[in-house]
């Protein structure tokens, strides 16, 4: 399971980092916004806070946020090394890969580059990137895992 989870983590981190120069150039070259669908567009937002811009105005040092994320990755890596469950390994791989992608941004760019803007009317979900999406899916899988297991036991 360790190899499986780490492979997922590597793919997520690579996809996140490979996409960013392309997206930065595309959005910047288009004047800051690329409309994709009536509820989705590409924008460039520099997130200096935690996930989804939480504490964005607090001016926390990027190295501090990266260190906290790295410590979390180590703890999740221990969990990954100990699990024999495919779903848990996939979820942990998604979270670790997303965290590594955002760590690379914080250390290399001083902030996390976010691009995806989902909205309904004037309401906008905070801009996010591939790494953030992977972390979110991983957390949902971890939280939903007990429900899935309970359903399997009933059958």
Image (cartoon, grey):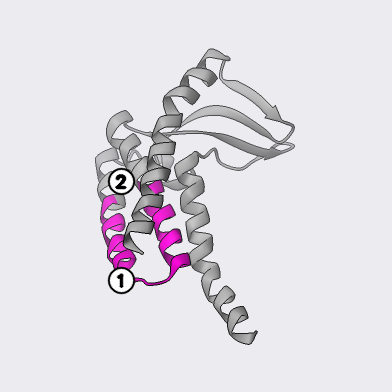
Secondary structure mostly seen in magenta is: helix
Q: Is residue 10 above or below residue 72?
A: above
Answer with mark 2 or mark 1, whichever residue precedes in sequence.
2
Instruction: Give x and y (percent) for residue 146.
Output: 53, 76
Alpha carbons under labels 2 and 1: distance apart: 26 Å
Is residue 54 visible in the rendered image? The answer is no
What stretch of residues is rendered in magenta?
70-99
On the picture, is 26 further left or further right than 12? right
Q: Quadrant of the C terminus?
A: bottom right
| Tag 2 secondary structure | helix
| Tag 1 secondary structure | helix
Pick out the residue farthest to the bottom.
154
Q: Which of label 2 and label 1 is nearer to you?
A: 1
Instruction: Give x and y (percent) for residue 88.
Output: 44, 66
Residue at image position (43%, 37%) is 16
Residue at image position (41%, 31%) is 18
Q: Kindly identify which residue carries mark 2.
A: 65
Q: Kindly identify which residue carries mark 1.
A: 82
């Amino acid at each position: 399971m360790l190899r499986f989870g780490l492979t997922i983590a590597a793919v997520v981190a690579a996809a996140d980092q490979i996409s960013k120069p392309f997206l930065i150039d595309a959005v910047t070259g288009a004047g800051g916004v690329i409309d994709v669908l009536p509820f989705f567009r590409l924008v460039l937002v520099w997130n200096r806070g935690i996930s989804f811009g939480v504490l964005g105005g607090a001016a926390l040092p990027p190295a501090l946020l990266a260190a906290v994320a790295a410590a979390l990755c180590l703890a999740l890596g221990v969990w990954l090394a100990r699990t024999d469950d495919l779903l848990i390994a996939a979820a942990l791989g998604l979270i670790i890969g997303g965290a590594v992608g955002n760590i690379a941004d914080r250390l290399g760019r001083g902030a996390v580059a976010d691009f995806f803007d989902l909205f309904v009317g004037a309401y906008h979900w905070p801009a996010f990137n591939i790494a953030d999406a992977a972390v979110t899916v991983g957390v949902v899988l971890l939280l939903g895992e007990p429900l899935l297991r309970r359903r399997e036991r009933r059958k």
